[in-house]
């Protein structure tokens, strides 16, 4: 069974549909038994949607966008190595 910390670590991949079926099922079972994690999931989804919608409406200078994309990619790569 997945614990709360693992749940939080897997949220991005879960929302993006990147998890294997077994891990997704374990995560969904955890959500059924853990109201705080389902509340966190709902907040996370809302925040992600809001940020995406806002970023689509704001013009970001190319240099800032490239720096941000590089930073996010590096952090994602570091997280995957853990």
Image (cartoon, helix red, strand yellow):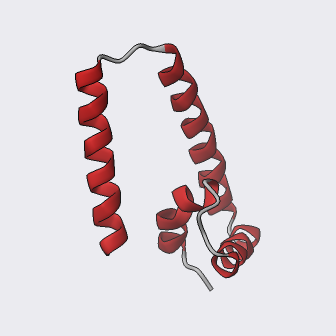
- Residue 11 appears at what percent x and percent y? 55, 59
Q: Is residue 38 left or right of residue 5?
A: right
In the rendered view, does 61 fall on the left or right side of 16? left
The image position of residue 60, as x and y in percent, is: 35, 18
Count of labels shown?
Answer: 0
- In this rendering, position of residue 20 left or right of residue 10: right
Residue at the image position 60 percent from the left and 34 percent from the top: 49
Residue 13 position by quadrant: bottom right
Q: Point out residue 57 in the picture as x, y percentages from the top left corner.
A: 52, 14
Quadrant in which the C terminus appears = bottom left
Residue at (55, 69) in percent of width and height? 7
Q: Does residue 66 lie above or below 72 as drawn? A: above
79 in relation to 63, above or below: below
Q: Quadrant of the N terminus?
A: bottom right
Estimate the x, y position of residue 68 in percent, counting from the top left. 29, 36
- Where, by quadrant of the figure, is residue 16 drawn? bottom right
Residue at the image position 28 percent from the left and 64 percent from the top: 78
- For image coordinates 76% across by 70% down, the residue present is 32
Relative depth, front residue between 32 and 47:
47
Say left or right for 2 vs 22.
Answer: left
Work out which residue is located at the far bottom of the displayed protein and give it.
Answer: 1
**Is the residue 70 above or below the residue 23 in the image?**
above
Residue 77: quarter of image? bottom left
């Amino acid at each position: 069974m997945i614990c709360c910390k693992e749940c939080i670590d897997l949220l991005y991949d879960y929302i993006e549909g990147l998890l294997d079926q077994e891990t997704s099922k374990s995560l969904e079972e955890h959500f059924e038994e853990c109201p705080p994690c389902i509340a966190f999931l709902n907040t996370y989804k809302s925040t992600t949607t809001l940020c995406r919608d806002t970023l689509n409406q704001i013009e970001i200078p190319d240099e800032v966008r490239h720096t941000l994309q590089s930073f996010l990619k590096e952090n994602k790569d570091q997280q995957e190595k853990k």
